[in-house]
Image: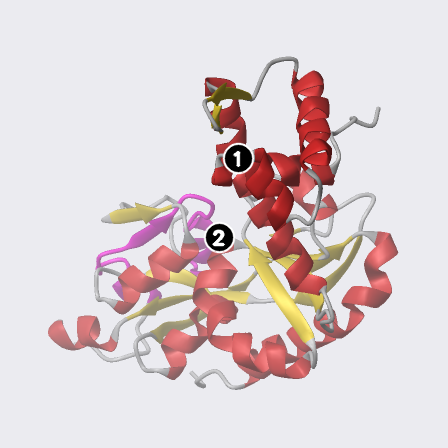
Amino acid sequence: MLKRYPSIQSMQAFLQAARAGSFSSAARQLSLTHSAISQQIRTLEEFVGQPLFVREGARVVLTDAGALFANQLGDGFEQIDRALSSVKEREVTQSITLDVDPELAQSWLVARLPALLGALTGVALTVLSAPRHDRSAFERVDLALRYGYGEWDGFENALICGDRLTVMGAPALLQARGLTAPLAPEHVLALPLLGYTKRSWIPWLASAGLPEVEPHAVAVFDNAAGLIAAASAGVGVGLARGLLAADAQHDGRLIELTQVEIPTHYNLYAVWPREKSARVAPLVDAIRALVAQTLNARVPR
């Protein structure tokens, strides 16, 4: 049901009278008659159901209700002015809202925003990071970049890239222990290990031919970007995705420690509402190209 509001004219008359303390002054400012101002304010008082002014000699003074209303109404008119000025006689830039997995945003996206914006001429991005469990976010944004298995029923999705997990650590950590890469897998277990709440070391141990017993970790992270930062700082070594660790590798902050790698099955997808396919297609292409560029440029083992 649509709400009924007082007229803009009556609210403007009220605000002007409140500022001037006089109906006559308000009438002159608005190029109206005194009776017109009185009528506008009388109509407004009927709408709110109580007086907004009391007369004190030649002046009018706000009641408590009037003072409260004037304070709130002034803010409302400022918002209306901002809304009008944002579109009045201006070319409105197309805007796309992009929801990005928090780990991807921290480790990869921010450094590539200039390139991404450059590939989307005339488009402004609003970047959000909704919680992973919040599937309703897909309905509130134009495009989402999420890790998963491609299981987003009711939405269009496209695999952006597969990936691999390798053990990575800081060169300074190896140097402090007199070691050089590549290491034998069993030697990795003698180093301080970093854990990740969403990933076990066991698949890597199985691929390396080692006993499949979860090893002790000196620190465990619930965010892969935090794990990569800790590994780069020399806290320990951990299993990291190629895409998320690419910049740290390129800068020499991380290196791969062994030849053992395992493929990821939980991969990066673009997800969007079906009705927005045409709108987001250029953005999906640009993201896929930047991801491919990142993975192709990573430091060889």
Q: Looking at the image, is mark 2 or mark 1 nearer the viewer? A: 1
Q: Which of 91 and 141 is in front in this view?
A: 91
Q: What is the residue that sits farthest to the top in this orientation? A: 49
x, y percentage for residue 164? 54, 66
Q: Which residue is drawn at 60% across and 56% down?
A: 82
The answer to whether residue 12 is left or right of residue 252 is right
**198 up-or-down from 22: above or below:** below
Residues in magenta? 185-209
Q: Which of 116 and 197 is in front in this view?
A: 116
Q: Residue at x 80, y 52 (%)?
A: 273
Q: Nearer the viewer, residue 275 or 294?
A: 275
Q: In which quarter of the image is residue 83?
A: bottom right
The label number, if any, that marks residue 203 in the structure image: 2
Q: Does the magenta stretch include residue 197?
A: yes
Q: Residue at x 85, y 66 (%)?
A: 278
Q: Which amino acid does label 2 sit on?
A: Pro
